[in-house]
Structure formats: C-alpha cells, structure tokens
Image (cartoon, helix red, strand yellow):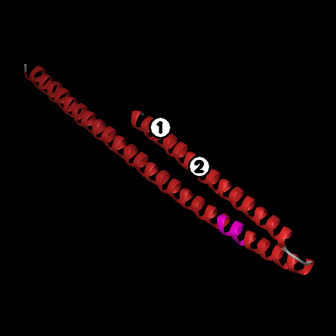
Amino acid sequence: IQLQDDLLFKISNVEQEMSEQLHSMLEEERKVLQHEDSWARGEIHKLKESAGNTDERMAILESNDTLLRRVVNQIQEEAKSAVAGLESEVIKAFNEIEEDIQLSLLQTTEKKINELLTLQAAAKARHDELEHTITTMQHHTGKS
C-alpha cells in the first residue's frame, strides 16, 4: 500500500510538472505572438503612412498580412509540436508507473502465495504428526 501511495504521489508530481511546463510554454508562445502582432501592426502603420498610392498600399498590406499569417501558422505548429512532445512524455511516464505498479502487485502476490504454501506445508506436517500419534496410540491401546 505504501508503494502504491508512493507511485500515486509520483503520478501527481509528474502531472503537476507537465502541466506547469505546458502552461509555461504556452505563455511564452502567447508572448511571442503578441510581440509579432505588435511588430506587424507597427510595420503596417509605417507602410500606410509612407505608401504613396492606394494600389501600392494594398499590395504592401497584403504582403504584410501574408507574412503575419505565416509567422502565426509557424508558431502554432511549433506549439502543437511542443504539446505533442509533452503528451508523449506524460504517456511514457504513466506507462512506466503502471509497469511499476504491476510489478509491485506481482511481487506482493508471489510473496503471499509463498507464505500460504509455507503455512500449508506446516499444517500438513502437523496433520501427519497428529495422525501418526493417533495411529501409535491406537496401536498401543489395541495391543494391551
């Protein structure tokens, strides 16, 4: 039971650590996105001010919008990849913990079986001893 409690404690710690890492990574990605968005907005503002004609402005805006979308998509893909990596680590940790629990249960069961076999052998020996005593007593009382 203590081993199971220890394993459950380890599971809880792994979950907490993975959750904190994921939260931290997502927070970093959010900050990067905000920075990129702010930068792109600043660039768009500068281009609006400096562009001479409407067609030129539209082309520049579309180009910046495309660039911004690429950056956002790239960051989203990196975030998905990071999350998938964390999920993989969590699954691996849970599998290892499950294996530890199964091994512990197997060892405990094996120990209990050995204890029962020892008790069974002692009981059989006592039974045989009592049977021998009874037979000997019957033999002696029958002869006298």
Q: Main secondary structure of the magenta part?
A: helix
As drawn, the residue found furthest toward the right would be 54
Instruction: Point out the residue furthest to the left here.
Output: 144
Three-letter residue code for mark 1: Phe
Q: In percent of the image, x 38 and y 44: which residue is there?
A: 104
Q: Left or right: 19 with respect to 134?
A: right
Tell me where the magenta segment starts and ends, as one range: 70-75
Q: Secondary structure at mark 2?
A: helix
The C terminus: image quadrant:
top left
In the image, 58 versus 117, the foreground residue is 58
Q: Quadrant of residue 39?
A: bottom right
Query: What's the residue at 77%, 72% (across, down)?
Result: 64
Q: Which residue bears the numbered disc 2?
A: 24
Would you say 62 lies left or right of 3 here? right
Residue at x 85% of width, y 69% of height: 48
Mark sitting on residue 9: 1
Image point (52%, 56%), residue name: 91
